[in-house]
Image: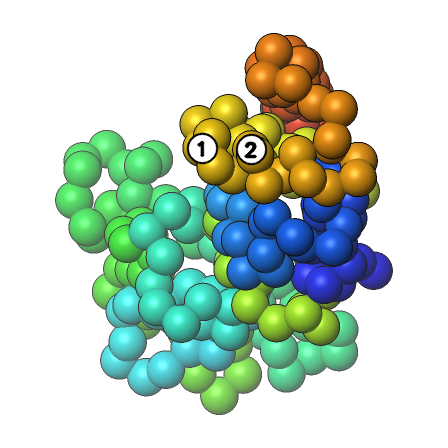
Amino acid sequence: MTTYAQLKAAISDDINDPSNLVFIDAIVGDMANEAFVEVGYIVPREFQENITPLADTLAYDLQQSVFDDPVQAIRVRQVELWDASETPDQFLRMFVPRSTGYASTSAAGWDVWNGVLAITNNQESIIDVTKHIIRVWGYSPYPPLTSDAQVLGVSNEIEKAVRIYCRVLALRRLVNQRDLFTQWQTTASASDVSPASLMSALGQAEDEWRRRARRLQTLFEAP
């Protein structure tokens, strides 16, 4: 699996700056995280989480093991109650979401607000905290990359999309910052690049990103 360090090295190669003479490691890392945010709008990260319920508790932070704070962009597709005392775990029932209720009240079903799953009093009343778990399926943003040894844990399609978007980000910076472009031209692989050819390269990179984004959207919507 690709690590954060390997991704940054690949991005630096893609933007003709393998020695990080122009785009230092920290900037490449920032671009990678920005790209993951952009890709996440098209293909969010899928997760399945088991929550250990607590007595007399109606609200649970989602993806606590991944994010330090509740994440507003988390969306939940399904919530179920399972018996974890059996081997394998046994399905008990599906919890009804608020969106399917006849009235738009918090008592109609579970809901997610600002990254927190809220269940109803009726749903809480059937939970045995000694043996039951709440199983959640949903979508979230990709967690920030912070450590070089951190594994991306994404498909090749998503990794490629991140690299393509990073190339777009780098070329935009070169177009908008003349001093940065001048510095980039001193590298061996970019010494013959003119401003006109740079604009052309940016246009090609943006076209490639748009094609990749449409492909990702189709992949995400497929059954």
- The numbered mark at residue 135 is none
Q: How many marks?
A: 2
Query: Could you tell me which quadrant the N terminus lies in?
Result: bottom right
Query: Could you tell me which quadrant the C terminus lies in?
Result: top right
Kind of residue indicated by mark 2: Phe
| Percent position of residue 83, x then y | 59, 74
Q: Is residue 53 visible?
A: yes
| Percent position of residue 100, x then y | 34, 35
The one of 25 and 108 positioned closer to us in this rendering: 25
Residue that extends furthest to the bottom in the rendered view of this protein? 130
Q: Is residue 86 above or below residue 126?
A: below
Residue matched to label 1: 177
Q: Residue at x 20, y 52 (%)?
A: 107
Q: Residues within 10 Å of mark 2 (few under 14, many from 20)?
A: many
| Percent position of residue 219, x then y | 70, 27
Distance from disc 2 to disc 1, alpha carbons, whole Å, reads 6 Å
Q: Residue at x 30, y 43 (%)?
A: 98
Q: Residue at x 62, y 78 (%)?
A: 84
Quarter of image, res 156: top right
In the picture, measured across the screen, residue 17 lies left or right of residue 173, that is right
- The numbered mark at residue 181 is 2
Kind of residue indicated by mark 1: Gln
- Labels 2 and 1 touching (C-beta < 8 A): yes
